[in-house]
Image (cartoon, coloured by chain):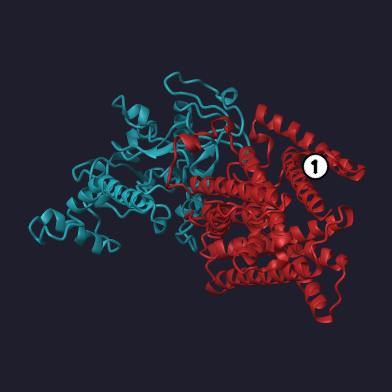
Chain colours: A red, B cyan
Amino acid sequence: MIEKVLKGNSNYWMWLAFLTAFIAVGAICYLRQFLFGMYLTGMGRDLSWGLYISQFTFLVGVAAGGLMLVLPYYIHNYKIFGRLTILGEFLAISALIMCLMFIMADIGQPLRGLNMILHPTPNSMLFWDMVVLLGYLTLNVICGWVILTAERKQVKPPKWVYIFVYVSIPFAVSIHTVTAMLYCGLPGRHFWLSAITAPRFLASAFAAGPALIVIACLIMKRVAHFDAGKEAINKLTTIIMYAAIINAFFVCLEFFVGYYSNIPGHKYALQYLFFGLEHNGHVYNNLVPFMWSSTLLCFGGLGLFAYMKISKVNTDLLVGIGCAMIFIALWLDKGLGFVMGGLAVNPLHEIVEYYPTANEIGITLGIWATGLLLVTVLYKIAVGVEHEVEA
Amino acid sequence: MDKQRRKFLKIAGAAALAGISAPVVVKLTSSPALASSTGHGETPAHAAPADAHAATGHGVEEAPTGVRLGMLIDMRKLYGHPELLEKLAAVCHKVHNVPEIDGAKSEIKWLWDVPFENAFPEHSAYHASAITKENNYLVLCNQCDEPPCVRVCPTKATFKMPTTGVVAMDYHRCIGCRFCMMGCPYGARSFNWMDPRPYIKEYNADFPTRMRGVVEKCNFCSERLALGLEPACVEAVKDIGAIVFGDLNDPNSEIRRRLDQDHTIQRKPSLGTKPSVFYIV
């Protein structure tokens, strides 16, 4: 099946070349970081986690989001998602590989990475995160490949693979739950120390993952003659709406707890993120525009979907715009705000702001480009098999 | 034939499982906590932990075991002497080859001083006294009895030394994930964002330097304790007795005597980390 990657029109190759340019820049930036040290990033003593870990956190959500296709199809026998489950699985594979790359980019001694396995430490949530991420990656590789091969041969997938499919469902929930546990179990980090962190992560994941799949479907409809079907896309936008609303609801609950209890520790991060935090005459507010953009995009996207559902207007362009708005909103919320907001007030109650460096952004873009390249290649295979079967 | 084989396999499997798990079952039931047949009240030693457990949270602490090193900083003796605070940091950093890197972003600190509201954000600084406002307070790793940094480390590169209770670092195992810095509610840990060696002013051959990409922090001068010396900071202000060091679990130690005498506070006690550094303010 891999040979399908090597056949494509000029647009396909242009797109791959475009991504490769970013990957090359990212690789050079990483080489610099590897050789000279992590002082080349914007991170520091107080803000010791930054863009890498926040992208990792967001992408774990994207990987888990495929669940919203797998679960209806395999558990509820919702046949309409039949052509899409493979896209969910392949997106999960690419997102997980991006996650692992971000982790490797983030650690100070990458050559010692195997210490995680050589000295397994069950009391560390990072250890369990590695276990579930590698587990989910393996499950998706097995399920995706076996099911696609079966489809190509036009036979039913072997029975044993369903065991892996069913196991992958709780695994999808676990990857994001354990990732939330990296944050919500730390004493003294009040913004993260919230039992709602894991549910909130899951809600935003179940909106962001499907949103990306819808966008991919719409693009592939134009460039690869792959039609997911109107009903499937419609159902997906409904799922995205519910998940985004639940996420917004959870954010509002965080606001209530912080502001009604009036406990400073619970308020600081929200205040910093949405209004700016004043300290010794200086107002720290570099994330305020991003957070309000996130809020507007989220409600704008929801409004657009609601309009489409009510007035039965349903164009691909509007669906695409709505999904992009929700996806960007959730990326700003989780891929930027959650990690930086939680770190803005350090344990000594000093306020520190984070500005990523060009080198750091280069690496980040490089990893995103690698992920997009992987998605492109894997989707190319999936769509190629689909066309082969149809022919 | 087939049925018989299946039956045989079932029995063999069950027998093997029973054989494997038997020692575990024996071990579990032999422990006094789980065995119901031992009878209550026979051994008072077994009853004690249960009582202590019921009473925790109301000042009654469980019977301590082993050595737990602790520090008492008598700030009263350091008030009005910012030069002493500076000297303490300088001594500590010199002994441990801590690099002098400028700027808050990449700096490395083991022992330093900050205003009261930063050192003790959980204590009120509203209408604080002139002394509280004018002086800075020493901060360092609290060598917690329940250290969150040890809990979160994915490689056991930071661990509690069983003999002293000190939270130590293995610089050779640390992968530089900085999770411990997230876990520490005291900001006591520093990461080597760059190669620290060019920034070491005066090299001390008795203590290893670190490499880029690992985390470090105060180690209660474990290397000096091993030689029978006191921690460098304790020694530096020995003449005024501003820092007392000793075993918190030994009722006859000087630190325990001093803790009995004066009211002391700890940093962020509500987080349950059980700091081993105490302050008289």
**Residue ID at (53%, 35%):** B175
Q: Could you tell me residue A74's position as x and y percent?
A: 62, 63
Residue extending farthest to the front is B1
Which class describes the residues within 10 Å of circle 1: few (<14), some (14-19), or many (20+)? some
Name the secondary structure under disc 1: helix
Count numbered badges in the picture.
1
Q: Could you tell me residue B278's position as x and y percent?
A: 35, 48
Residue extending farthest to the top is B205
For residue B175, above or below residue B63: above
Q: Could you tell me residue A358's position as x and y percent?
A: 76, 40
For residue A371, above or below residue B163: below
Subunit of mark 1? Answer: A
On the question of residue A336 being in view, the answer is no
For residue B75, above or below residue B220: below
**Nearer-the-camera pick, A212 or B170:** A212
Q: Quadrant of the N terminus of chain A?
A: top right
Q: Could you tell me residue A277's position as x and y percent?
A: 65, 60
**Nearer-the-camera pick, A377 or A160:** A160
Picture quadrant where residue B244 is located: top left
What type is the residue that disc 1 sits on?
Answer: Lys
Q: Is residue A19 left or right of residue B150?
A: right
On the question of residue A365 being in view, the answer is yes
Q: Is residue B47 left or right of residue B259?
A: left
Q: Which residue is tagged 1?
A: A4
